[in-house]
Amino acid sequence: MPGVCLAAGALAAALPLTQFTLAWTHSIEKIRWEEDWRVVAGKLVIDEARIRGSGAGMEPPPDAKLVDGVWHYKPEVPPLEEVNLAHSPFTKGYEICTAAGCTPLAKLLPGLPPIAVITLRACGG
């Protein structure tokens, strides 16, 4: 079954997901961001992004729509081979969310060092 693979150095995890939300909190403004992703033909495709406010370096694009205090928009990003995420003790970590709830990526990669790059890729099976 296709899914999402996470890697950071020698650490790796595979999740049997074909769609998920990647979520994080902006380090300065403390505002939540969310991106909805799908695995399609071995690549990661972003469907929608949401910002729960605006501020330093996080202005919504001109075509964003404000719905119940949340900016919704479609990022113009082609399908990606991978997404690289910075993990550090200076910010709240990334989460991967499904209908069952959200899980910190650090919990999915036990032994993750304090500073690392986490790579998300589509994985097949």
Image (cartoon, rainbow, N blue to C red):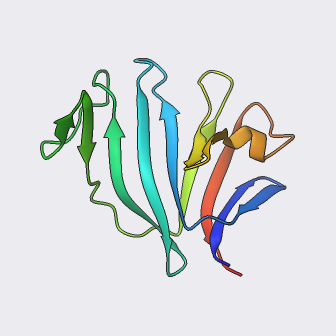
The residue furthest front is 100
Q: Nearer the viewer, residue 107 or 11?
A: 107
The mark total stands at 0
- Across and down, in percent, residue 23 comes to 50, 40
Q: Is residue 7 above or below residue 49?
A: below
Q: At x 44% / y 18%, what residue is drawn?
A: 28
Quarter assignment of residue 74: bottom left
In the image, 107: left or right of 89? right
Looking at the figure, which quarter contains the C terminus? bottom right
Q: At x 43% / y 53%, what residue is drawn?
A: 36
In the image, 114: left or right of 58? right
Looking at the figure, which quarter contains the N terminus? bottom right
Q: At x 33% / y 53%, what residue is drawn?
A: 48
Q: At x 59% / y 38%, what residue is drawn?
A: 94
The residue furthest left is 62
- Across and down, in percent, residue 104 comes to 67, 38
